[in-house]
Amino acid sequence: EDQVTQSPEALRLQEGESSSLNCSYTVSGLRGLFWYRQDPGKGPEFLFTLYSAGEEKEKERLKATLTKKESFLHITAPKPEDSATYLCAVPASNTDKLIFGTGTRLQVFP
Amino acid sequence: EAGVVQSPRYKIIEKKQPVAFWCNPISGHNTLYWYLQNLGQGPELLIRYENEEAVDDSQLPKDRFSAERLKGVDSTLKIQPAELGDSAVYLCASSSRTSGGALFFGPGTRLTVL
C-alpha cells in the first residue's frame, strides 16, 4: 500500500539549532517527491521537487535530500520565521494522485 | 503572477444546508485539484480536472459532493446537504505540464458545520 510517513510530528528548536525532518515513503517507481511549507491558515507552499536518489535541492536555510526510501529536510541555523508545518508528498504508484504525509510542525524559538 | 484564488475564505453553516466554494487557478494551468484537509492531517484529493474533464473523482463522496469546471478555468465545489463531519479546510490547487508535477495551492476555505 502506498504510504508516506513523516517524523517527528512536532519539533521545537532554539534559533540557530540545526536539525532534520524525515519523510519515508513506500510507492512503486518513485516519480518525484515534493516538499511543501504550510503556515497556519494558509495553503501549502511549494518548496522542492526531488526526482532521483542522491539528488539535493537548497533554498536559503533549507536543504532537501533523497534516498531510495526516504527524504530529509535539513534546516541549518533556523530562525523563528522558519516556524511552520512541513509536508512531503509523492505520486501514488498507479496514478498521478499525490499522497501527503501528516507533516512535521516546526517551532523555532528566539 | 497571481496565485490560486479561492472564496470564501471562511464559511459557517448549519448542518443540512448547502455550501459552495469557488476557485480560480493560476493563469495557464490546465490541471485543477480540490483537496480536503482535516486538522493535523495532510491534504487528501477529492477531484482532479484536466481542462473541463474530471479525470480522478474516485475520492469524491458523490452522494453529497459535486464539482464543475465548465470552461476549463474556474471551478466550483458544492456540498448538499452538509454534515458535521464536513468541517475542514477545502483547498484548491493547480498545475501545468511545465511545473514538473508540483501543485500550487490557494489559501483554502475553512468550513465549519454546526
Image: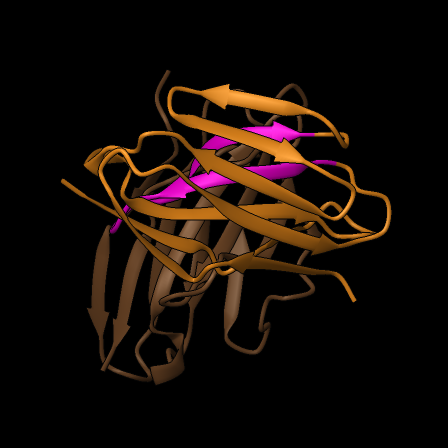
Chain colours: A orange, B brown
Instruction: Residue lying at the far top in this picture: please name it.
Output: B1
**Left or right of B62: which side holds B112?**
left
Instruction: Residue lying at the far left in this picture: please name it.
Output: A110
The boundaries of the magenta stretch are: A32-50
Where residue A20 sits in the image (x, y, percent)? 47, 43
Pick the residue in front: A39 or A107: A107
**Left or right of B99: which side holds B105?**
left
Answer with the quarter of the image where residue B89 lies.
bottom left
Magenta stretch: dominant secondary structure: strand
Residue at image position (78%, 50%) is A95
**Left or right of B65: which side holds A4?**
right
- Quarter that holds the N terminus of chain B: top left
Residue B54, can we see it?
no
- Quarter that holds the C terminus of chain B: bottom left
Where residue A8 sits in the image (x, y, percent)? 46, 59
Residue A47 belongs to the span the image colors magenta: yes
